[in-house]
């Protein structure tokens, strides 16, 4: 299939592009490289640099690529940043996303696959979280992704644009070639691994007074290769709707740090800090729907294996991508 991938130079997008190419798809990557890296784009893909600003070039680029499907990864995705700069999140994730939806309709794209998030749920009534639970985000990041989900609904109703929206839990791990390199790193696992890499003296725990067994936040970590496989399954005809992607296992911040110690064989000191605004205490996926309806089967369900692949990549690329 001919596939157009926004954000294909980013962390999740780069691995998805690699897996799409491995599965025999043709890929055009569209990325403005503010978060992504040129060297994270698989050389087998065609790369188009996204010019900033809404000058109509996006619609032309999509039309010229003549894709059968669009995979939309490009977004800002930091809970903490969204609590201080909400406008950035609504502008990029909603307004820029809307231009892409219009371009998709104009180019008669058959399938749209969207990277949504468990942050759309907010603190859930129960865990594991299933897709039918109410969505009540408590940060602008989650709100912006929920707004895009609603737009998708109306574009399907009115324009017949078929879509799959994946609500990712916590993406983690790496492939052999591509891994996690944010210019300003705020994610837990790469920050913790900076200590055994010799780049930090300690890691930080944001909040130790949550209503969880050890007082720290619980998240469901999912390997990016498994996320990528779900996207490939979503391209099959007739697949549509909203799906959670997670392993159904929750790990606290302290458990993640312990796992990193186990994988690296190094002691990782942690300093306790106040809560980070916008963080729900516990997010764990119920992903039975994706398993049942898409035939999805995660290859790396265990946190220790996920962290091991991240550690291998960071050891090989201690400074991340060079550009
Ligand atoms: N966290 C932490 N220290 C860090 C980075 C993150 O304690 O250096 C916590 C964060 O507050 C959250 C969890 O780890 O409870 C996962 O955060 P991350 O930013 O990796 O992903 P998020 O769940 O926000 O998408």
Image (cartoon, grey):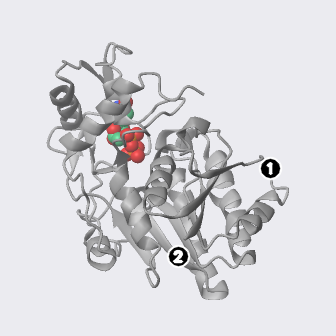
Local packing at callout 1 (Cα closer than 10 Å; few below 14, some 14-19, many 20+) is: few
Q: Are marks 1 and 2 in contact (CB under 8 Å)?
A: no
Residue 100 badge: none
Work out whether residue 108 or residue 191 is closer to the camera in this orientation and state it. Answer: 108
Where does label 1 land, which residue?
53
Q: Is residue 53 above or below residue 122?
A: above
Residue at image point 65% right, 76% down? 109
Quarter of image, ligand 1: top left
Spot occupied by residue 31 in the image (x, y as percentages of width and height): 65, 48
Looking at the rendered image, the quarter that the N terminus falls into is bottom right
Spot occupied by residue 107 in the image (x, y as percentages of width and height): 73, 75
Q: Is the CB of mark 2 within 8 Å of ligand 1?
A: no
Q: Is residue 278 left or right of residue 310?
A: right
Instruction: Examine the rendering and report whether any part of residue 286 can be seen.
Output: yes
Spot occupied by residue 224 in the image (x, y as percentages of width and height): 37, 50
Spot occupied by residue 19 in the image (x, y as percentages of width and height): 43, 56
- Measured in 3D between alpha carbons, the distance from the residue under mark 1 to the one under mark 2, in whole angstroms, is 26 Å
Where does label 2 land, which residue?
163
Q: Is residue 288 left or right of residue 2?
A: left
Instruction: Examine the rendering and report whether any part of residue 137 can be seen.
Output: no
Q: Earlier in the sequence, mark 1 or mark 2?
A: 1
Looking at the rendered image, the quarter that the C terminus falls into is top right
Residue at image point 26% right, 43% down? 306
Q: Is residue 292 left or right of residue 153?
A: left
Q: Is residue 20 left or right of residue 49?
A: left
């Amino acid at each position: 299939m001919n596939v157009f991938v926004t954000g294909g130079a980013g962390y999740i997008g780069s691995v998805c592009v690699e897996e799409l190419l491995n599965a025999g798809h043709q890929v055009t990557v569209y990325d403005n490289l503010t978060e992504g890296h040129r060297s994270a784009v698989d050389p087998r893909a065609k790369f188009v640099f996204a010019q900033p600003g809404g000058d109509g070039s996006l619609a032309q680029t999509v039309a010229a690529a003549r894709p059968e499907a669009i995979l939309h990864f490009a977004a800002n995705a930091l809970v903490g940043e969204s609590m201080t700069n909400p406008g950035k999140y609504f502008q990029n994730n909603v307004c820029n996303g809307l231009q892409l939806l219009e371009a998709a309709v104009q180019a008669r794209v058959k399938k749209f696959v969207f990277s949504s998030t468990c942050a759309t749920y907010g603190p859930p009534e129960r865990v594991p979280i299933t897709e039918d639970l109410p969505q009540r985000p408590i940060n602008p990041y989650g709100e912006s992704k929920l707004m895009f989900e609603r737009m998708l609904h109306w574009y399907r109703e009115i324009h017949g644009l078929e879509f799959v929206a994946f609500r990712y839990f916590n993406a983690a791990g790496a492939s052999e070639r591509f891994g996690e390199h944010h210019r300003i790193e705020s994610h837990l696992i790469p920050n913790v691994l900076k200590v055994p890499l010799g780049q930090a003296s300690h890691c930080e725990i944001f909040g130790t007074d949550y209503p969880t067994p050890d007082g720290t936040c619980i998240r469901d970590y999912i390997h990016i290769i498994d996320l990528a496989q779900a996207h490939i399954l979503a391209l099959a005809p007739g697949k549509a709707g909203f799906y959670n992607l997670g392993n159904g296992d929750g790990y606290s911040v302290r458990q993640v740090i312990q796992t990193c110690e186990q994988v690296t064989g190094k002691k990782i000191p942690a300093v306790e800090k106040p809560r980070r605004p916008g963080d729900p205490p516990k997010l764990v996926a119920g992903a039975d729907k994706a398993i049942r309806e898409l035939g999805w089967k995660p290859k790396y369900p265990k946190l220790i294996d996920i962290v091991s692949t991240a550690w291998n990549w960071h050891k090989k690329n201690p400074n991340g991508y060079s550009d």
